[in-house]
Amino acid sequence: MPSFPLILEDTSPMLRFSSQWISGTSSGDSSLDQYSEISFMVTFVQGETTSFTFNGTGFSIVGGKRPNHGFYSVNVNGVNSPAFNGTSANNLFNQTLFSNEQLQKGTHTAVLKNDGVTDVDFVAIEVGIGQDDEDLIVNTYQDIHPIFTYAPLSSWTTTPESVGAFSGSSGHATQDEGAEVKMTFERNQGDGITIYGPVGPSMTSSYSVQIDNGPSASFSANKAFYRSQQIIFFATNLGPGPHILSMVLNDAGQLAIDYVNVFTTASLGGSFVGILSEANTTNSTPSPAFHSSTSSKSHLPVGVLIALCITSAISLVFMVQLVWRKIPKKQSLNIDRETAMPFQIGVSHPHNVIDSSLSSTPSTTLRSRVTATSPPEYQEITNYLQPERTKGATGSQ
């Protein structure tokens, strides 16, 4: 089956840190920029944990090994590992603290426990979808796509905080407790889904996610620093049939949706989704903004666009002809000895005159943004998985 790493940064709500973990800062650590996305979580308290649950075939926990670090252990599906040593004479970053790549496809839970000082940069989860030797299909849906339904509509705004940092500068957000967004798709559209949105100090500490009337799970997007385009939920191996994913705001703060990636393969009946008509986007009507940042979206009919192109072309031809007629005819130039002499200060040179009518006007390039639902090329994130890991459960002794 197609297998790919899904990267959960330390700021992703999918990673659950106990209360005594703190965010690394530049004032407290001059090596902050050595971490992925210039961000990491660290704890100095023995017994503190970070945990995550996923459906996949393997995972790796990546962090730093540093002189002040100590021992830690990892529990996978209730089985404890031996203690590993995170101490290093020199600062080492992007280190695999623990890895297990021999898990059966299914749901797994991993818990890292600190016994000294430990930091976590990100977690890479190995996800498998479909059958062996077939390509992975990834379709991206922006927040205005018809698969999204926002309720009540009056509770949602299309100008969330820092919307310019969103994909396509487009997003939906709410601050009303009980407000809900639903995503509806068939299995042939996807067997796995990742939802992207921002985290930060003004984001909610509680939102819940439910799939197909199953059990709901709660997460927190409230983090020390603002980060856009984070994975705020993911699920794979959803099974046959249509799926409805519901996300509800449970507490104070803001819940924002940027876009979703839906994963499928040909054996599941999936295919790349072309650009769809946005006529069915009445559920995306803007409501009052929380912040001053704005985002406007206009959609012109095809006929209007064609008419604009034709009139623009006619205008361009007319302007070229007008300019051509105003250009003076070529005249023979009689260059005398004085004209050919080098320029001298104090000597009048009546021939050295630049005709201002021949100055050129710079052209202007017009750019238009099109919100496309056709998928970008999927890129595997392999550089995060350095150094190369051996199969099975491994860590640094």
Image (spheres, rainbow, N blue to C red):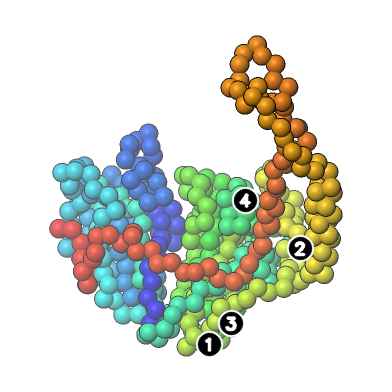
Q: Which mark is in front, 3 or 2?
A: 2
Residue denoted by label 1: 269
Q: Quadrant of the C terminus?
A: bottom left
Residue type pointed to by label 3: Glu
Residue denoted by label 2: 299
Q: Which residue of the protein is positioned furthest toward the top in this rendering?
A: 346
Dot 1 or dot 3, earlier in sequence: 3
Compute the Cα span from label 3 to label 2: 27 Å
How many residues crowd mark 2 within 10 Å: few (<14), some (14–19), many (20+)? few
How many residues crowd mark 4 within 10 Å: few (<14), some (14–19), many (20+)? many
- Asked whether residue 186 is in view, the answer is yes
The kind of secondary structure element at disc 1 is loop
Residue type pointed to by label 4: Val
Place of residue 380 in the rendered image (x, y in percent of width and height, measured from the top left):
40, 67
Contact? badges 3 and 2 (CB < 8 Å): no
Kindly identify the residue that appears in the image at 80 percent across and 55 percent down: 316
Residue type pointed to by label 2: His
| In the image: residue 260, left or right of residue 281 | left
* Circle on res. 186: 3
How many residues crowd mark 3 within 10 Å: few (<14), some (14–19), many (20+)? some
